[in-house]
Amino acid sequence: DVVMTQSPLSLPVSLGRPASISCRSSQSLVYSDGNTYLNWFHQRPGQPPRRLIYKVSNRDSGVPDRFSGSGSGTDFTLEISRVEAEDVGIYYCMQGSHWPVTFGPGTKVDIK
Amino acid sequence: EVLLVESGGGLVQPGGSLRLSCVASGFTVSTNYMNWVRQAPGEGLEWVSTLYTGGATYYADSVKGRFTISRDNSMNTLYLQMDSLRGEDTGIYYCLRGLRGTAHSWGQGTLVAVSS
């Protein structure tokens, strides 16, 4: 199975400051069709997750442009340009290029 | 509006069975690849199963042989039949539309508790 690792696992940030989360996969996520199926999700307490980014860098509808995704191969990053209070919660990366689909352990973001 | 509504969760004894349902509206289940993802209490996300439009199915090793994903096109509903349930199957089960592409959404989840 493809193992997804995230760092840091806990990220205290100040409002208005940038934040960055790293996600690494144990093997390349480039699929046979040329796409890289790496998603980012955000989950607030008591709510289902919400996808923010798909295929590395594509923002889902309604996702603020302060969120951006980048990376290739095995190394990926989610960046928040200016953290807002509503951004607290847990962020997960997920790969859909290989069976089984696997998620990272999650990064907990809270406000300093 | 796209909506996914799960039901069928509850308390069941180890070894028992449950069938989860996910009623979809705003899109057609049979033309999307559908998934179940679960989350144990206080834990992260775990993919459980996927059903492709053509009928191909995929399962996590932890549920293979015990769970069955299916759909009823006339009811626009996705199912997860869960047999031989274990304590480690406890958690919230989410129904998902798509994972890879543009079309994607989550239900609110249904809670499954396996305990004697």
Image (spheres, coloured by chain):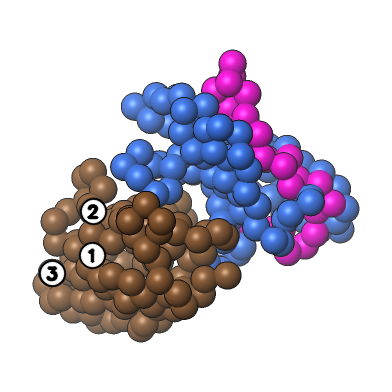
Identified by mark 3, the residue type is Arg
Q: For the C terminus of chain B, which image quadrant? A: bottom right
Please identify the quarter of the rendering in which residue A110 is found: bottom left
Q: Chain of mark 1?
A: A
Is label 1 in a helix, a strand or a loop? strand
Disc 1 and disc 2 in contact, CB within 8 angstroms: yes
Residue where numbered disc 3 is placed: A82
Q: What number is the disc on residue A58? A: 2
Q: Mark 1 to mark 3: distance in Å?
A: 14 Å
Coordinates of residue B25 in the picture (x, y in percent): 45, 24
Q: Which numbered circle lies on residue A69?
A: 1
Q: Residue furthest top?
A: B74
Chain with blue colouring? B
Residue type, mark 1 in image: Gly
Sequence order check, earlier mark of 1 and 3: 1
Density class for disc 1 (Cα within 10 Å; few <14, some 14-19, many ≥20) is many
Q: Number of numbered discs present?
A: 3
| Front of the two marks 1 and 3 | 1
Q: Mark 2 falls on what kind of element? A: strand
Q: Nearer the viewer, residue A39 or A88?
A: A39
Q: Which residues are magenta?
A: B67-93
Instruction: Please say whether residue B109 is visible from this viewpoint.
Output: no
Q: Chain of mark 2?
A: A
Q: Few, some or many C-alpha atoms within 10 Å of disc 2 (few <14, some 14-19, many ≥20)?
A: some
